[in-house]
Image (tube, rainbow, N blue to C red):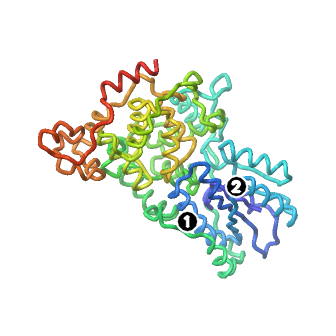
Amino acid sequence: MLWFRNDLRTHDNPALHYFLNTSCGSSSDSPRKAIFFISEKQWLAHDWSLIKIDFIKRHAAALVDELANLNIELSLVEVDTFDDQVNYLTQYCQAHNVDTVFANSELEFNEHQRDLNCIKQGVPLMLYEADVIVPKGLVLNQSGSMFKVFTPFKNAWLKQVRTAGFDYLGKITRADDKETLADNKVKSVNNIIKSDGLSGTWPLAKEYEANVFSTFLQTKLTGYEQCRDIPSIKGTSGISPYLAAGVISPRYVLIALLNRCPDLLLATDSPEFSWLNELIWREFYRNLMFHEQKLCKHYCFKEQYQLITWHNNQTMFTAWCEGKTGYPLVDAAMRQLNQTGWMHNRLRMVVASFLTKHLLIDWRLGEKYFMQHLIDGDLASNNGGWQWAASTGCDAQPYFRIFNPIRQSERFDPNGEFIRKYLPELSSIPDKQIHFPHKYMEQNNISGYVKPIVDHKEARLKALAFYK
């Protein structure tokens, strides 16, 4: 039996690969069995956003048809919690004499505990690794420990890939001698999935790979380093939701990248490498969480910050959430998140710094809010990014480095194009004044935009004293 989790794909899927290469579970002419649990109560308890849940459902529905062509019947089973998943699998394996359940491992603590409970209950679970390029725990420092700084990790990771390569299983296609499932069976399973359309502007993975990603590699990759920080243009790949949901393999991404730039692993000073660098950051954060499971439980990586008494002003937090801080770039970024379920990466750093340094609000509140709204919510990357901004994490920016949201706006949205898109109340403000328009608006008797909830210079001094 095959158990899909955060890996709804047939491309480079180890559990699917080994499942198909065994004789377990079915005769050659009858469909093999696979399962995917729709556990919305559990997902919501883990702060998954509604747009991500819809994204997952759409891919689950598409996978039903794709697996039918492999003579695999995918059952979509609705249960509330991980405990319910364990109970269902235990009963199913006993009732059907299942001798192996193939699945890909999941990183997070609760998921790991669920798998241990399955094994304790007698579920014959066989786990593989599918969420990283280099197996977690393999890239270590000379003392055999996890790196605490990104750059040495990156160098060791690159050395590992250059010398040992990496496993890539490719795409699994239907064998000609296999019969597919009847259409009525596929439809009866498919009817369980009801998409609410929240993620409809994001294409399914197959369409993304064929159109968006291929176009990015051909036309945008070389300019990524220059365009990546400009939120008013589409200079990034938009691949993060697909990696977070596991519908695209990171190893597939690296293969595609190397096909485009064969020498990239050596050309670390090339413009294209800056995009690969982001993939390695993802590997870094996943390795970090693998070694430090306390990060799944909202602990600061740097223990000296664990007992900080954050100010946590609810009025200010609400203003931040709603994009009403009086700092245009911060507000435009938060409104982009609230309206689209996504936020440009440069802006994620800006708003996270503002919440933790200007408002002195606990990074965990921001981390939670992001997870509850992002289509690409991923615990390891989200936690790593927030602790980086709050200076509480591994390889974080020092506490005395505090983003100036006005200067960030002037540098990365110089003409105010992004700001005007999400703050129409500032559409008439000149480019030079739009980054902090309050004095100009007062002089010209213009209203309609909120006053700043803190003064940047004062907030900066308070933050320095607070952290010190």
Q: Is residue 181 above or below residue 315?
A: below
- Residue under the image location 44 percent in, 24 percent down: 399
Q: Position of residue 438 (x, y in %)?
A: 21, 38
Q: Are marks 2 and 1 in contact (CB under 8 Å)?
A: no
Q: Is residue 92 above or below residue 407?
A: below
Q: Secondary structure at mark 2?
A: loop
Residues 85 and 309: in front is 309
Q: Is residue 197 above or below residue 13?
A: below
- Residue under the image location 69 percent in, 77 percent down: 181
> What is the number of callouts on the image?
2
Quarter of the figure with residue 9 = bottom right
How far is disc 2 from disc 1 in space, using C-alphas?
20 Å
Which amino acid, by three-letter code, is at mark 2?
A: Thr
Which amino acid, by three-letter code, is at mark 1?
A: Arg
Q: Secondary structure at mark 1?
A: helix
Q: Earlier in the sequence, mark 2 or mark 1?
A: 1
Q: Position of residue 51 (x, y in %)?
A: 50, 58
Which quadrant does the N terminus fall into?
Answer: bottom right
- Residue under the image location 44 percent in, 21 percent down: 466
- Whether residue 418 sits left or right of residue 394 in the image: it is left
Query: Comparing marks 2 and 1, which lies closer to the viewer?
Result: 2
Residue designated by label 1: 58
